[in-house]
Image (spheres, rainbow, N blue to C red):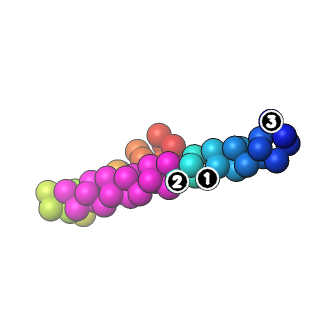
Amino acid sequence: MTFTDHAAKRLLRGKSLERITLGWNLIGVIVFAFARSVAEASGNPNGWLDSSIRIGARS
């Protein structure tokens, strides 16, 4: 294989990993929005803050 073949494979792998990362972040946003809505529905308007701190601490 030539240098350009290796570079093309690395570029393809990098783009694939970027898409996976963006998808994972999208899932995180959906989970965060759900947690926030559940906290607000349970009568705890500050529950979203607790959820965001816990999500932020895991990252």
Residue nearest the observer in this picture, 20 or 44: 20
54 on left or right of 59: left
Amino acid, disc 3: Met
> How many C-alpha atoms fall within 10 Å of the one at disc 1: few (<14), some, or many (≥20)?
few
43 on left or right of 7: left
Say which label, 3 or 1, has the lower sequence index.
3
Amino acid, disc 1: Lys
The residue tagged 3 is 1
State whether residue 39 is above or below residue 17.
Answer: below
The residue tagged 1 is 15
Q: Residue at x 85, y 42 (%)?
A: 3
The residue tagged 2 is 19
**Residues drawn in magenta:** 20-38
Local secondary structure at mark 2: helix
Say which label, 2 or 3, has the lower sequence index.
3
State whether residue 1 is above or below residue 39.
Answer: above
- Image quadrant for the N terminus? top right
Q: Residue at x 51, y 43 (%)?
A: 59
Q: Position of residue 21 (x, y in %)?
A: 52, 49
Q: Is residue 40 visible?
A: yes
> How many C-alpha atoms fall within 10 Å of the one at disc 2: few (<14), some, or many (≥20)?
few
Q: Nearer the viewer, mark 2 or mark 3?
A: 3
15 on left or right of 25: right
> How many C-alpha atoms fall within 10 Å of the one at disc 3: few (<14), some, or many (≥20)?
few
